[in-house]
Image (tube, helix red, strand yellow):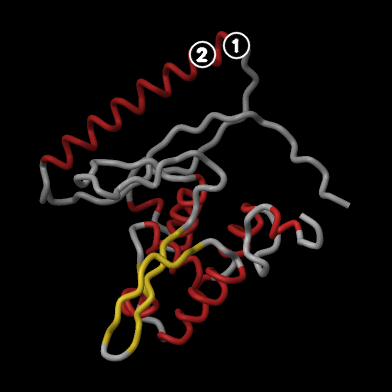
């Protein structure tokens, strides 16, 4: 594509420089944007609905949502526009599935007991929990990773253990959903991660 920038070639907006991870990290680098994105993990929102939820000035939320997150970082997109009293209220949603194959889910389905999260969504929720110092609120909660060396046999065993854990977690979540209204229910993130431990390539000259 002659005359285009790298960001235009990979589908990013002209103002959204860098890789998907670069844009996510830039978006996370401000407390207001972190709070906005944490709300959007749960579903679309407008500057008005978000400002009411986080009790923050509408102008500040609108700037970070529509100017920085949408235009500069390209991590949210317009989901719908609803006419309201002679104006238009714009609802945005996250577009965070560039770094993983997680299914955003939720559309046209009955309320699931759990859903897969993209890497970016998981990162947002973890950072929000750290901001709120909420890890100690639920005994045993952690953001825990390990680095190890495995051969092909061990890899198959790890995958089998991961599948077994995932099945048990979903069964527990479904049982919890059927006990709807049970006192003490709360949202949690549960997961197992396994991926190659490689060094990133050197930046382009």
Question: Which disc number belongs to residue 156?
Answer: 2
Task: Locate residue 15, reporting x and y percent.
Answer: 66, 69
Q: Residue at x 23, y 45 (%)?
A: 109
- The location of residue 162, given as percent across then percent down, is 42, 24
The furthest residue to the right: 205
The residue under the point 29% across, 41% down is 114
Question: What residue is rendered at 17% in x and 42% in y?
Answer: 177
Task: Please indicate whether residue 40 sits to the left or right of residue 71 in the image.
Answer: left
For residue 40, which quarter of the picture? Answer: bottom left
Image coordinates of residue 159 in percent, x first then y, are: 47, 19
Location of the N terminus (image quadrant): bottom right
Q: Which of these two is toward me, 168 or 8?
A: 8
Residue 87 sits in which quadrant?
bottom left
Q: CA distance from mark 2 to mark 1?
A: 6 Å
For disc 1, the neighbor class at 10 Å (few under 14, some 14 to 19, many from 20) is few
Q: How many marks?
A: 2
Q: With respect to residue 62, does 78 lie above or below?
A: above
In this figure, which residue is indicated by the disc labeled 1? 152
Circles 2, 1 touching at the beta carbon (< 8 Å): yes
188 left or right, relative to 21: left
In percent of width and height, residue 107 lies at: 29, 50
Say above or below: 54 vs 60. Answer: above
* The residue positioned farthest toward the top in the image shown: 153
Q: Nearer the viewer, residue 7 or 185?
A: 7
The secondary structure type at the circle numbered 2 is helix
Q: Give the secondary structure at mark 1.
A: helix
Residue 192 image-quadrant placement: top left
The extreme bottom residue here reads: 86
Tell me if mark 2 has few (under 14), some (14-19) or many (20+) residues whose alpha carbon lies within 10 angstroms of its own.
few
The residue lying at 17 percent from left, 40 percent from top is: 176
């Amino acid at each position: 594509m002659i005359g285009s920038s790298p960001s235009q070639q990979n589908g990013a907006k002209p103002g959204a420089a860098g890789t998907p991870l670069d844009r996510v990290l830039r978006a996370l680098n401000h407390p207001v944007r972190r709070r906005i994105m944490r709300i959007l993990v749960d579903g679309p929102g407008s500057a008005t609905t978000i400002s009411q939820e986080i009790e923050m000035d509408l102008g500040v939320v609108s700037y970070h949502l529509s100017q920085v997150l949408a235009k500069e970082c390209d991590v949210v997109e317009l989901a719908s526009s609803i006419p309201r009293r002679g104006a238009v209220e714009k609802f945005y949603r996250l577009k965070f599935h560039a770094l993983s194959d997680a299914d955003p889910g939720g559309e046209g389905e009955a309320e699931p007991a759990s859903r897969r999260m993209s890497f970016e969504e998981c990162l947002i929720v973890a950072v929000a929990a750290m901001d709120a110092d909420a890890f100690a609120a639920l005994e045993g909660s952690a953001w825990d990773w390990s680095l190890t060396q495995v051969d092909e046999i061990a890899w198959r065993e790890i995958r089998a253990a991961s599948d077994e854990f995932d099945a048990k977690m979903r069964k527990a979540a479904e049982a919890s959903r059927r006990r709807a209204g049970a006192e003490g229910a709360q949202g949690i993130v549960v997961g197992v991660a396994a991926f190659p431990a490689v060094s990133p390539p050197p930046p382009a000259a």
